[in-house]
Image (cartoon, rainbow, N blue to C red):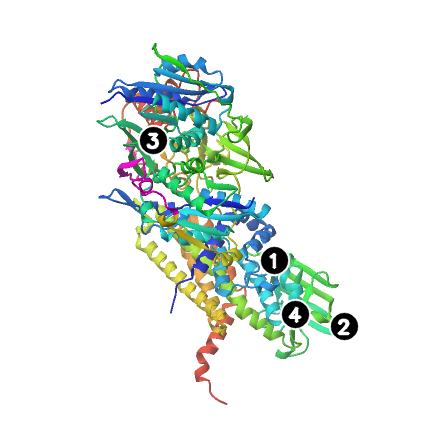
Amino acid sequence: MKRMIVCVKPVPDPKAWDRLQMDPVSKTLIREGIPSIINPLDKHAVEAALEMKDLFGAEVVLLSMAPSDAHPVLREVLAMGADRAVLLSDKAFAGSDTLATSRILAQGIRNIGEFDLIFCGNFTLDGSTAQVPSQVAEFLDIPNVMHVCDMEIPNTQSLLLTQKIEQGTVKLEAKPPLLLSFTKDANKPRYISFMEILAAEKREIQTWDNANLNIDETLIGLKGSPTQMADLLLQSKQRKGIRLTGNPEEIARQLADKIHQLGII
Amino acid sequence: MKRQHVGVFIEQRGGVLHDVGLELLGKARELIEVSKGTVSAFVLGRDISAHSEDLIARGADTVLLADSSALEPYRLLPYTSVLAQACKTYDPDILLFGATRMGIELAPRLAARLNTGLSAHCMDLRLDTEGKLLQMVPGWGGGVVATIRCPLHRPQMATVMSGVMKKLVPTKRSGECIHLDVREDFQGSGPKVLEVHIEEPEEMPLEKADVVVAGGWGIGNPDGWTILQDLAALLCGAVGATRPPVDEGWVPESRMIGQSGKTVKPRLYMGIGISGMSHHVVGMDESECIVSVNTNPNAAIFEVSDVAVVGDYREILPPLLKEIRARLPEGRTDTCEPPQ
Amino acid sequence: MDFLLSEREELLRKSVREFAEAEIPPKIEAMEKTGEFPIELLEPMARLGITGIIAPPEYGGVGLGYLARTIALEELGRVCAAIPMAMQVHHMAIAALNDFGTDEQKQKYIPPLAKGETMGVVAVTEPSGGSDVVGMQATAELKGDKWILNGRKCFITNSHTSDFWIVMAKTAEGAKGLSAFIVEKNHPGAKTGRVEHKIGLRGSNTGELVFDNCEIPKENILGQEGGGLAVALKTVSESGRPGMAATALGIINACLEEAAKFASERVLYGKPISSLQAISFYLAEIYTELDICRLLCYRASWMKDQNMRCDNENAMAKSYTCDAAVRCALKAVEIHGSYGILQEYKVQRLLRDAVVTVPAGGTGQIGKVVLARAALAPYRKKK
């Protein structure tokens, strides 16, 4: 077990989401001024990789596709104990959907070189599609397992994974190379120690653009995204307090409709 | 508009179909109406042909069955391969998956294999005038709704959470079954399944419940809690309370929601007979949807509710329970996930 | 003048905040009940680097400076001030050993403190007084190759959770008659005495140390014989006062957050009470006090990191910040109305904690004695 790669993503801090504004012309969200944090589930992925480092002395490399201002967030994740970070940043990547993003990440991984395991968080707070892990694995032609809530390493050739499903759990046996995405039950991410903060200041963050990755322009960014956004609506979080009227039966019917709309019935 | 072919992945584990596949069949029928197109159900597993009749009755024109011991239990890579092959042969314009644990893992892998677009947990699906799929997707914790299109790549793929779409009532319909040829044994294809462990659902802890039915001083007496418990059980939720009922001994303190109690963030919070003082509200104001029932039209809780009912819970809840029961699928007594 | 903190300092703050918010609240109920320090937190705090923050790396520490320490203590204090109270005395012991110890003493005693294996103690105060340092009654007499200590120390933080203590005693009369010693709890004649039950900072253990013909090896004198006053004053002034100030600073931060949050949610007359000027002005005052105290604390710590003399600045930070903590906590309690005096609400603990910071670690009055001296210095009549 020599090298672990962890895909991490800076996401806008949920505490600041109520400040989100939309550009009415481009129909994109204005992210400037909204502070970023590391996607919370990614910390569990980093922790899993650091456990491999503790056990086998593996190198832990962080990989992120993000704007160039991602450095402070990456520095923070480096301070958890990772060895170095690679930031994939290029204007040409902007507007990528999950397919294009996964293609870019996969190429970044190929450029980093050989690896044993790739770790991801199960989903991100902003898009929450949870699509990238399976798609990156597909592009790298390696198996992947999502919803991992437990990982045991009996030996370097075999992993025992527990996957969370609705009705319970599935136990799987898998071999590297492999991509795993973790749920928050998987482990408790370690706190950033002062010693690691000091050490992380010396750790490298390499930035690669498409000149380094050399991906066909038609396969990245907006051009490379099969899905396109046709419209974007901001929903107010202000509770409307809609008053239901009518006799009890009519009210009951309206309430049942609402409960159905929520997906509960 | 050309005739649309909509495919639906029918998820099953251990021979039991997940409701979401049936719900998506219902939606698929709606989508193909204008163009008088067809709906195909894609079913993978072992000994699954018994489901064909039900699938046709629920909206499938064609049931494509990949029946093989190599496909039981579910494994990501074998399922991806079989579905990819089936898509190449049967060429659906649209392919729908449930946004379940399985769907979330499988649909993206398939989309990448087919080099096509996929949108996640759509809250609605529509066709534009040319018959292309419009996918409504929430983001940013629900603060934003995006309309997504996949104009050029096929199939247009989407995942939808269980409960968003509606199953069709089974009707007498005709359809055909096609058995897909599955030659591979997929032995070396990815991780091995050692065990599938189904868990007994336990007493729902308040903080984990999807639905919380909470009662306050307005319930009036300990007997009033029975109907709250019935409602919570029906919706597979947990019962909560404010401080006064706890002090009166009508409920244990572990049920208390608020400043000095628990904080809950369920999908649905129903506050019954609760005035809405801030020390209770801070324990539940991040719930996705807040519905309140109170006899006082000026109750503070209405300020933080999405839906407000001015009325007596004793009059409102019994018909509500009846309405909900009427909407449950046959044989079901609550909305909890069926054990498999 | 650059008032901004560095990326390193911001990350440090974030790291302690995340730790404090997750690990300390579950311990608070027991701390309030028993007054005992949650000893199980020592190991995670050591791993984070809190216990050894100012200790040199060669002795197992992190080797960061006093501004970093102030930020760390402030963030701990924001969650529960008893924790930084205990930690800041712990750091005082490390500082005393580092400044005055022989190589052997540093090698032996700093690593267990830096690594959080035991807690640090600096015992100056006696029933005869704490402010009146020179008036202490505890004695130490050299008999052969042993020092014999007699006396008692009271109001000692970490008294019952430590394996060894730095103790001041009289070896002769007068200001040049004080000496500092390292006493291990196993040394014959060394005992812990009663445990005190404070109204605030509960969870920081406060108690008595008793020396009854206590025999300690000759080499356990810390610094010069007769140089004990310098040990006490330097340690209190450069580590103790800023540590107390940082603890109180965390309390003020918590006061602002609790009061502002409550005022935004509590509705009276149809609107949140934050719309009432009386309330919002209180919040403006707390907001200002927070910033004043932060500037005082950070500036004094920054000076220490530049090796500048900062006794006045530390005295100012300690006396002002602890008094301000009480003022802010009282306002925060008032903003909560009747809820403010209920035990279920956090804000009453902030008031009790703030009150206890006032006499602890050097009274505000002694601080003012120091400051008055500084103010009058240019006008002192030459003899």
The residue singled out by tag 2 in the image is C145
Mark 1 belongs to chain: C
Instruction: Read off the magenta span.
Output: A213-242
Is A182 situated left or right of C141 in this image? left
The residue singled out by tag 3 in the image is B122
Residue closest to the eye, B275 or A129: A129
Q: Mark 2, residues whose alpha carbon is within 10 Å: few (<14), some, or many (≥20)? A: few
Instruction: Calculate the distance from the C-alpha at mark 4 to the C-alpha at mark 1.
Output: 18 Å
Tag of residue C103: 4
Q: SS of the residue at dot 3?
A: loop
Is C175 situated left or right of A111 in this image? right
Residue B28: which quarter of the image?
Answer: top left
Mark 3 belongs to chain: B
The answer to whether the residue labelled 2 contacts the one labelled 1, judged by CB atoms less than 8 Å apart, is no
Q: SS of the residue at dot 1?
A: loop
Q: Mark 1, residues whose alpha carbon is within 10 Å: few (<14), some, or many (≥20)? A: many
The answer to whether the residue labelled 1 contacts the one labelled 3, judged by CB atoms less than 8 Å apart, is no
**Is disc 1 on the same chain as disc 4?**
yes
Placement of A124 over or under B232, stated as above or below: below
The residue singled out by tag 1 in the image is C115
Asked if the magenta segment contains residue A159, the reply would be no
Q: Mark 3, residues whose alpha carbon is within 10 Å: few (<14), some, or many (≥20)? A: many
